[in-house]
């Protein structure tokens, strides 16, 4: 996984669209002092390189009834089951993130549940049957910081 050389225009574009993914290309062009076509080409280049990965609307889980956010460290009975457990986790809609990690857990997931009772049901009925030896749950009271990867001196040399 290498990184790509970006110039100052790429950096400026990334800063603008990271702040507002719905910003019109012409507004980005004006801010960057280039043509709309140039912005369109740069966005396409950044997308083709995999630097930009689409755009999305973000749903606030709490506003649709999912009031409990939990992080769960999973210990697998058989660590060779990473792939099959990952595929099974994809079928559980409450699971929104899954990471292979170093340290004490085999995997670390983030889930949203309607409440603590629903969280217990997800753990007991959906996670335990996947072949876990055990799990550790951390409930998040409130998200304090959430942001995109900051664009910090990406054009400077190391």
Image (cartoon, rainbow, N blue to C red):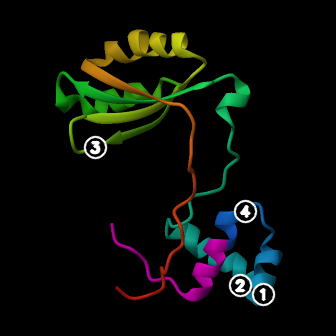
Which span is picked out in magenta?
Answer: 1-15
Q: Nearer the viewer, residue 117 or 3?
A: 117
Q: Give the spatial CA distance, label 1 vs label 3.
A: 44 Å
Counting residues from the N terminus, which is met first, the one under dot 1 or under dot 3?
1
First in sequence, mark 4 or 2: give its number. Answer: 4
Q: Residues within 10 Å of mark 3 (few under 14, many from 20)?
A: few
| Badge nearest the viewer, 2 or 3 | 3
> Which residue lies under the disc numbered 4?
20
Residue beneath label 2, please? 38
* Residue appearing at x 76%, y 77% in the figure: 28
Asked if disc 4 and disc 2 are in contact, CB closer than 8 Å, the reply is: no
Residue 67 placed where, x, y %?
A: 62, 24
Find the distance from the CA under tag 2 to the CA under tag 3: 40 Å
Of badges 1 and 3, nearer the viewer stands 3
Instruction: Give the vertical position of 4 relative to 100 (above or below).
Output: below
Where residue 62 appears, x then y in whole percent? 67, 29
Q: Count neighbours of disc 2 (C-alpha within 10 A) and say few if under 14, some if 14 to 19, many if 20 or more.
A: some
Question: Does the stretch in magenta take in 72?
Answer: no
Residue 101 is tagged as: 3
Of the residues under marks 4 and 1, which one precedes in the sequence?
Answer: 4
The residue pinned by badge 1 equals: 35
Query: Which of the 4 quarters of the picture holds residue 77?
Result: top left
Q: Secondary structure at mark 4?
A: loop
Residue 55 in picture, x, y percent from top left: 66, 55
Disc 2 on helix, strand or loop? helix
Q: Are marks 2 and 3 in contact (CB under 8 Å)?
A: no
State which tag comes first along the sequence, 2 or 3: 2
Q: Is residue 93 above or below residue 155?
A: above
Contact? badges 2 and 1 (CB < 8 Å): yes
For the residues labelled 4 and 2, the Cα–Cα distance comes to 19 Å
Q: State yes or no: discs 3 and 4 in contact (Cβ < 8 Å).
A: no
**Residue 8 in magenta stretch:** yes
């Amino acid at each position: 996984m290498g990184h790509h050389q970006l110039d100052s225009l790429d950096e400026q574009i990334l800063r603008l669209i990271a702040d507002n993914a719905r910003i019109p290309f012409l507004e980005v062009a004006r801010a960057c002092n280039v043509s709309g076509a140039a912005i369109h080409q740069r966005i396409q280049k950044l997308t083709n390189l995999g630097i930009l990965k689409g755009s999305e609307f973000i749903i606030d889980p709490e506003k649709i009834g999912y009031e409990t956010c939990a992080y769960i460290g999973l210990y697998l009975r058989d660590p060779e089951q990473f792939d099959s457990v990952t595929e099974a986790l994809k079928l559980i809609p409450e699971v929104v993130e899954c990471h292979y990690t170093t340290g004490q857990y085999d995997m670390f997931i983030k889930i949203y549940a309607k409440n603590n009772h629903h969280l217990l049901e997800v753990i007991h009925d959906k996670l335990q049957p996947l072949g876990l030896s055990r799990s550790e749950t951390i409930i998040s009271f409130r998200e304090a910081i959430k942001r995109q990867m900051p664009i910090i001196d990406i054009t400077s040399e190391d």
